[in-house]
């Protein structure tokens, strides 16, 4: 590999490094919490350590260790200074204000100001008398487009905002101000500024850490509160991971996602968008396949093999059995999305550089790779919600039918669920029977188009948090209905 080509690939590494560092922070916090628990309650700490052997915590720990090892290996190859400054700015105060007196008849009096122009989001100058302020200093040997000096009048502020698209009032790495006071009186100059991280993409690190810690916290709470349901969920997750379909889905998914980097889509410069679209669909289909397979094996096969009768002979109700199975399916889906979703984020970052090289474009910046990577996250969240909804449907079907009918029904629901809007639209103004069928499908089947935002993800359109919230509420309501149906079907099922 030539040095130039190697340098190009280095551009895609900082976003991946931020992802791995988020895993390191999560591991550090978890270890600190476990250490505190070891001092306060050794027995609880021992139980927490044993939880690594269950079906979810163990694979998640391996994922965190893999991401952490990747971050450590990439550390010498990333711009730590720039990333460190932006991370520090995330924690520091954003707004600042200072006042200074300009001496009478002062000419180009230097004003001490401590800010980096690259971090400037807004800047305001205000004086109590006429004043001339110079923000840009000439640099010898360079022909620069100079911003005119700022002519301040009494109590009339001068403002600059990055969002307005105007030229930054400062040049270089440091800001410098000089003021000229033509009056015989001292003038008070007030400076207000708002600073933001130079690279807002560094928020990937804290968001990754917060997300992983939230998952770990909710899982710990789940294991402690509904213990019987958690035991069934743990057994279901372990059984799913032990099935060959899980390993095949993870390996095939990772290999295909990596292959998407070099596959030519022939889209005239839109290959990154196609990778995101194809990657989201691949992860969702593989997760759905694993979940439906697991539902069939852990419910239908247990009923047919009389294993469920043995389990329910213990102090475990049928309701707890169904809820535990559903929780196990959710954990399996979450595992698949955590693993393959991490691979998809990495391949998206790498694809930006590869696409620029193949298309003879200007080399992108690492923040461009990070921006493309961030746009994938809402698609992953919505795809996970869709998989959870279909897991509830699969669980209801598996209480009465075997694996093959379950697969057929679930993937039929998946296909028709995405076609519901078209079915309803096509039924308008048609025969009565066509309208009836369209309305029936729209009432019974889930509208899975609510979870399909590939067009927004591909187009780089930001997805609002409110949309994710409403989609989560819809998935929760439909999953609840499907679980009620599963409970009704399983309640009077003869297990003997």
Image: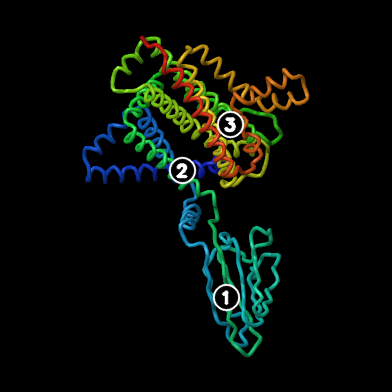
Sooner in the amino-acid sequence: mark 1 or mark 3:
1
* Residue tagged 1: 190
Residue 2 visible in the picture: no
Which quarter of the figure is the C terminus placed in? Answer: top left
Q: Are marks 1 and 3 in contact (CB under 8 Å)?
A: no
Q: CA distance from mark 2 to mark 1?
A: 39 Å
* Relative to 417, residue 363 above or below: below
Q: Is residue 369 left or right of residue 302?
A: right
Q: Position of residue 408 (x, y in %)?
A: 55, 14
* Residue tagged 2: 208
Of tags 1 and 3, the one toward the viewer is: 1
Q: Is residue 430 left or right of residue 285?
A: right
* Residue tagged 3: 261
* Relative to 213, residue 260 above or below: above
Sooner in the amino-acid sequence: mark 2 or mark 3:
2
Sooner in the amino-acid sequence: mark 2 or mark 1:
1
* Relative to 163, residue 415 above or below: above
Q: Position of residue 448 (x, y in %)?
A: 60, 29
Q: Residue at x 54, y 39 (%)?
A: 377
Q: Which residue is nearer to you in this view: 490 or 299?
A: 490
Q: Residue at x 64, y 32 (%)?
A: 274
Q: Which residue is nearer to you in this view: 23 or 418?
A: 418
Indicate the secondary structure of the residue bearing disc 2.
helix
């Amino acid at each position: 590999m030539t040095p130039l080509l190697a340098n190009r690939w280095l551009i895609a590494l900082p976003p991946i490094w931020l992802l791995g560092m988020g895993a390191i922070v999560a591991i550090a916090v978890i270890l600190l919490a476990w250490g505190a628990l070891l001092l306060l309650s050794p027995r609880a700490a021992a139980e927490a350590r044993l939880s690594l052997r269950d079906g979810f915590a163990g694979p998640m720990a391996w994922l965190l260790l893999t991401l952490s090892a990747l971050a450590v290996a990439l550390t010498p190859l990333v711009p730590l200074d720039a990333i460190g400054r932006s991370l520090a700015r995330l924690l520091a105060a954003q707004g600042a204000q200072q006042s200074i007196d300009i001496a009478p008849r002062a000419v180009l009096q230097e004003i001490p100001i401590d800010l980096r122009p690259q971090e400037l989001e807004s800047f305001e100058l205000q004086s109590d008398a006429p004043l001339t302020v110079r923000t840009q200093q000439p640099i010898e040997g360079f022909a620069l487009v100079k911003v005119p000096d700022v002519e301040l009048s009494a109590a009339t502020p001068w403002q600059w905002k990055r969002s307005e698209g105007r030229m930054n009032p400062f040049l270089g790495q440091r800001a410098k101000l000089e003021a000229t006071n033509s009056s015989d009186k001292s003038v008070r100059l007030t400076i207000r500024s708002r600073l933001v991280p130079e690279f807002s993409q560094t928020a990937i690190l804290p968001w990754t850490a917060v997300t992983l810690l939230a998952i770990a916290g909710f899982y710990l709470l789940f294991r402690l509160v509904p213990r019987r349901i958690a035991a069934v969920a743990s057994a279901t997750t372990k059984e799913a991971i032990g099935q060959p379909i899980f390993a095949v889905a993870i390996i095939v998914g990772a290999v295909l996602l990596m292959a998407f980097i070099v596959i030519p889509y022939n889209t005239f410069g839109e290959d990154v968008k196609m990778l995101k679209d194809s990657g989201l669909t691949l992860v969702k289909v593989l997760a759905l396949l694993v979940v439906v397979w697991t539902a069939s094996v852990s419910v239908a096969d247990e009923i047919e093999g009389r294993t469920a009768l043995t389990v329910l002979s213990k102090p475990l109700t049928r309701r707890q059995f169904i809820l535990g199975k559903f929780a196990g399916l959710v954990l399996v889906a979450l595992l698949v999305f955590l693993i393959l979703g991490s691979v998809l984020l990495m391949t998206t970052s790498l694809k930006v550089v590869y696409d620029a090289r193949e298309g003879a474009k200007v080399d992108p910046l690492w923040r461009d790779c990070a921006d493309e990577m961030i746009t994938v996250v809402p698609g992953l969240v919505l795809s996970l919600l869709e998989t959870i909804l279909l897991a509830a449907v699969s669980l209801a079907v598996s209480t009465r039918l075997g694996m093959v009918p379950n697969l057929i029904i679930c993937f039929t629901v998946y296909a028709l669920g995405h076609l519901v809007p078209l079915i309803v639209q096509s039924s308008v103004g048609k025969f009565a029977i066509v309208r009836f069928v369209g309305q029936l499908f729209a009432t019974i089947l889930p509208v899975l188009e609510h979870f399909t935002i590939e067009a927004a993800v591909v187009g780089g359109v930001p997805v609002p948090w409110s949309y994710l919230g409403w989609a989560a509420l819809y998935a929760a309501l439909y999953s609840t209905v499907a679980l009620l149906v599963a409970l009704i079907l399983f309640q009077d099922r003869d297990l003997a």
